[in-house]
Image (cartoon, rainbow, N blue to C red):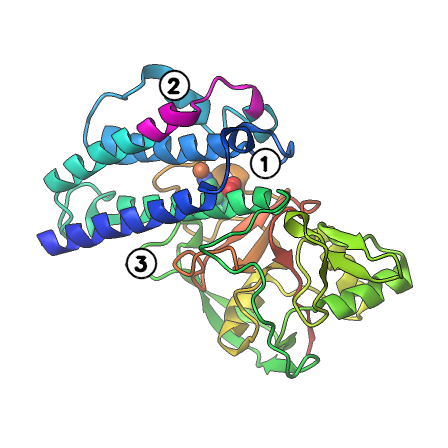
Amino acid sequence: MTAISKDAIAGRLSEVRERTLALVDPLDDDQLNRVHSPLLSPLAWDLGHIANFEELWLVQRIGGREPLRGDLGRLYDAIENPRTIRGELPILHGPELRAYLADVRRRTLEVLAEVDLSPEAEDPLLREAFVYEMLLAHELQHNETMLQLLMGLDGYQPTCVDPDPAPERDGSAEMVRIDAGEHRIGAAPLGFAYDNERERHRVELAAFDVDRLPVANRAFIDFMEETGAAPPMHWKPDGSGGWLDARMGRRARLDLDRPVAHVSWEEADAFALWAGKRLPSEFEWEAARPQLGGLGQVWEWTSSHFLPYPGFEAFPYPEYSEVFFGDGHRVLRGGSWATHPSVARPTFRNWDLPQRRQIFSGIRLAREA
Ligand code: AVJ
Ligand code: FE
């Protein structure tokens, strides 16, 4: 690979870092260090973790360098330090945290100048710049986690993303038919994808119908009124029987045509039952994707458990996907307004526990044809 491609990588690394720093730019140290919710890390932990992940992979692993701060890295190990205890850890703050981000980045660029990124590179981490793509994706995914927390911060106003994307307003009840047949599921062997998206394989599906648009706030309110179901996270009563969008401390009129967000899998499943439909499986979702509208506003819960595809091999580390496989987590597909488009591949699999709703999660419905 030529020097130009390395320049492109360096350029993208700095673009993504600018996005990360723009997210926290309006915040003071107290807001960065505070534990806002036991489900989410303090923002200072996310920032240190972003830098430490970069140091581990791009500096220590690829560059063979010693860690800058000795054992400190252990505090940023997501498995060793569950979210509930991250507020109590002696992590970096303020200028020290900023310096760590910058020091790691300087070393990353030194190492980048030395490595062989050609398709013949011996290390599979370097082939097609896999490890750099992983880094970019990782940081962008943490941007979304940070935005989950920022939804609860009074007066916050994101600058690099629009939390109020315009809904697609036409054809609200329209379904599309997907004919029975074999569908190719998963990521092609070349190009960046996470291990859980491989191997690509064929799946036989019966015919089904799927909604062209995700479920809107209007329909979710009908469901709440008929069944007594709880409102989504971040809604507040308006005092006269209606609901307000209370994200970021706002009291905004709820746009009834916008896809409902911040519902759990359990709520999505109950809604589907009430509506006389069901959630699509993740394979149905992937097969139907070219024909779906309203994409990119909310993650969409599927009926699927997060399981390995046939031939799965953990790469480059089992703690990304493998340790989460099983019937505990459900798969979400698509991507939300908070997801960077480069993360939202058609084959990308997101996952969370069925009761969680701090993520930007909505509902799309399917039924047997
Ligand atoms: C894919 C969003 C479930 O946040 O736990 C970030 C992404 N993995 N760092 C998560 C991730 C390691 C992951 N999700
Ligand atoms: Fe991470």
Quarter of the view holding residue 224: bottom right
CA distance separating discs 3 and 1:
34 Å
Where residue 129 appears, as percent x and y from the top left, is 23, 49
CA distance separating discs 2 and 3:
36 Å
Residue occupying the point 51% across, 52% down: 158
Callout 2: SS: helix
Q: Mark 1 points at which residue?
A: 40
Residue occupying the point 27% across, 52% down: 12
Q: Nearer the viewer, residue 263 or 119?
A: 263
- Mark 1 touches mark 2? (CB < 8 Å): no
Where residue 23 appears, as percent x and y from the top left, is 46, 46
Q: Which of 223 and 14 is in front in this view?
A: 14
Where residue 184 appears, as percent x and y from the top left, is 44, 68
Residue occupying the point 65% across, 34% down: 37
Label 3 CB, ligand 1: below 8 Å?
Answer: no
Q: What secondary structure prevails in the magenta region?
A: helix
Label whose residue precedes the other's in the sequence (3 or 1): 1
The residue under label 2 is which amino acid type? Leu
- The residue stretch that appears in magenta: 87-100
As for residue 226 lying within the magenta part, the answer is no
Callout 3: SS: loop
CA distance separating discs 1 and 2:
20 Å
Looking at the rendered image, the quarter that the C terminus falls into is: bottom right
The residue under label 3 is which amino acid type? Pro
Apparent side of residue 117 relative to residue 223 in the rendered image (left or right): left
Which label sits on residue 189?
3
Quarter of the view holding residue 257: bottom right
Q: Name the residue under label 2.
A: 72
Callout 1: SS: loop
Label whose residue precedes the other's in the sequence (2 or 3): 2
The answer to whether residue 185 is visible is: yes
